[in-house]
Amino acid sequence: MRQTARRIGARRRGVIVGGLRAGETVTAAVGDSGSPAPLDAHTLVEIGSITKVFTALLLADGIVRGDWELRTPVRALLPTVAEVPSRNGVEVTLQHLATHTSGLVRSPVPFGLRDNVAYLRHGTDPYGDFTGDDLLAALAATRLRRKPGTGGVQYSNFGYGVLGHALAHALGQDYGDAIADRVCLPLGLLDTVTGTHRSAAQQSRSAQGHRSRKKTADAWPLEGLPGAGALRSTAADLLTFLRAQLDPSGTPLEQAIRVTRRTPPGGPGSMGLGWHRAGKQVLWHNGGTGGFRTIAAFRPDAGTAVTVLVNQSSGADLAALRLLKRVS
């Protein structure tokens, strides 16, 4: 773990590496947080799209409770004024959104030249002014690229933004509260929150994101797309989350976790709900915002898991997967 952290950290502002094997966790940190707080297992970072596996678990928990089904059309969970596109007579379901087979484009926001320059130079959040109302407006105005459920996986932040919005609306909560009540608190994840739900103590332990070792990046609250990437977390919390994935029977969300690890009927074999598959053994998801890159991966057959959190927009996915192979 220390070797991997040193190797990754040689060209990054800071990196935290966490591993789990045979029930034992180890973390190693190299570099600094870019803030007064030390860089360690309890430093909060933007985990970006790893948020999607939390959204998928919220979905699965509702399935277990009987709140909704995978085949439920998403329009049934959205406000009654929402307009949801269909294609060839097929409606978008919760399963389509959770497996990236909805036909929705990658982003609800078009990226122009000015937006790309701002992102590349400053890590500017392209969704900074994007709200939940904007999400519903974009959904009403969009045209599906294909019939839902066909054509394989086409990754969509738009889709997971809609999914998170729909689940939270159906529960009568905002996304941050729904994730806390249904997922994080039952699993003991006290440091996994949206930016707006951070306590003063958590803000003081938050890392600063960077575009390069010396250039800082703007924070990405993603308030209009929380289900796609708004969560902050720590290496300690992510290892606890991965421990629950490896041993669901020891958690109150056992059935829901098992649902997320399986490919749903008719779904793409390369995915569970939220989780991607690498071969037959590895489930994983990575994340990226303007100033952070993260990944979480695990092997149920070996009882091993790793996570790598970098407070710079330079990822370490390959190094993390190699580390998982080594510890397995």
Image (cartoon, grey):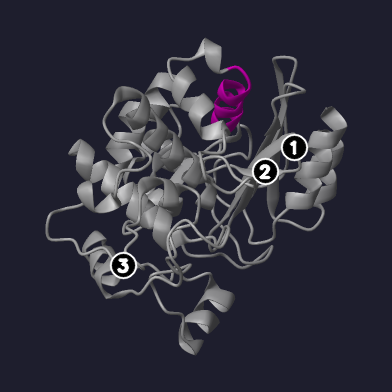
Give the labeled residue for mark 1: 280
Q: What residue did someone put label 3 on?
A: 130
Q: Nearer the viewer, residue 305 or 302?
A: 302
- Mark 1 and mark 2 in contact? Answer it, CB < 8 Å: yes
Dot 3 or dot 2, earlier in sequence: 3
Q: Is residue 15 magenta?
A: no
Q: Which residues are the magenta region? A: 236-247
- Decide if residue 3 is on the left or right side of residue 96: right
Residue 197 lies in quadrant: top left
Q: CA distance from mark 1 to mark 2?
A: 7 Å
* Image location of residue 9, percent across then percent down: 78, 50
**Which three-letter amino acid code belongs to the residue tagged 2?**
Arg
Around disc 2, counting alpha carbons within 10 Å, would you say few (fewer than 14), some (14 to 19), or many (20 or more)?
Answer: some
Q: Which residue is mark 2?
A: 277
**Amino acid carrying mark 3 in the image:** Phe
Q: CA distance from mark 3 to mark 2?
A: 31 Å
Q: Residues within 10 Å of mark 3 (few under 14, many from 20)?
A: some
Image coordinates of residue 123 in percent, x first then y, are: 53, 69
Which residue, as the protein is rendered here, is positioned at the far bottom? 113
Which comes before the other along the chain, label 3 or label 1? Answer: 3
Q: Is residue 201 visible?
A: no
* Residue closer to the observer: 18 or 214: 18
Q: 207 and 256: which one is in front?
A: 256
Q: Nearer the viewer, mark 3 or mark 2?
A: 2
Left/right placement of residue 300 relative to residue 134 reads right
